[in-house]
Amino acid sequence: MTKERRGVRSHPIGLVTLDDGRPIAAYRAIVRLTCTDCARPILPGALFSRRTQPVSRLSAGQGRVDVCAVCRPLHLEGHMTVPSSAGEEEGP
Ligand SMILES: [Zn+2]
């Protein structure tokens, strides 16, 4: 149900920590992607995160956009778990 079937563009690596300490699912790019916020290329092998964007002008109907690690710094701290069901967020 959560599988994307249009070709693999990234690989989930688990949860990392944001600057404010909140956990977020991080991904490693497999192909060259583009950051939605700064239009900077996310090169293969680079870490990035995703955020949900209200579907307004996106004709594709997809609400998830890629955000590079420059716009949203990611901290690979101790608790790195790879969830079996990617996309779920853990709350306190
Ligand atoms: Zn960016």
Image (cartoon, grey):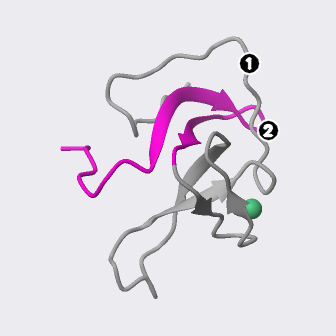
Q: Is residue 18 left or right of residue 67?
A: right
Q: As displayed, is residue 5 above or below residue 17?
A: below
- Per the rendering, the mark at residue 20 is 2
Between tags 1 and 2, which lies in front?
Answer: 1
Q: Which residue is located at x 70 percent, y 11 percent? A: 78
Q: Report helix, strand or loop for mark 2.
A: loop
Q: Is mark 2 within 8 Å of ligand 1?
A: no
Residue closer to the observer: 22 or 5: 5
Mark 1 or mark 2: name the one nearer the start of the chain.
2
Amino acid under label 2? Asp
Distance from the alpha carbon under mark 1 to that under mark 2: 13 Å
Q: Is residue 84 left or right of residue 46?
A: left
Q: As displayed, is residue 57 above or below residue 6?
A: below
Is label 1 in contact with label 2 (beta carbons under 8 Å)?
Answer: no
Dot 1 corresponds to which residue? 77
Q: Which residue is located at x 51 percent, y 68 percent? A: 53
At which x and y percent is residue 45? 63, 39
Q: Which residue is located at x 57 percent, y 27 percent? A: 15
- Per the rendering, the mark at residue 66 is none
Q: Quadrant of ligand 1?
A: bottom right
Q: Which residue is located at x 34 percent, y 79 percent? A: 60
At which x and y percent is residue 62? 37, 69
Q: Is residue 81 left or right of residue 69?
A: left
Q: Is residue 91 visible?
A: no
Q: Quadrant of the C terminus?
A: top right
Q: Which residues are magenta?
A: 1-30
- Please state the total of marks drawn on the protein image: 2
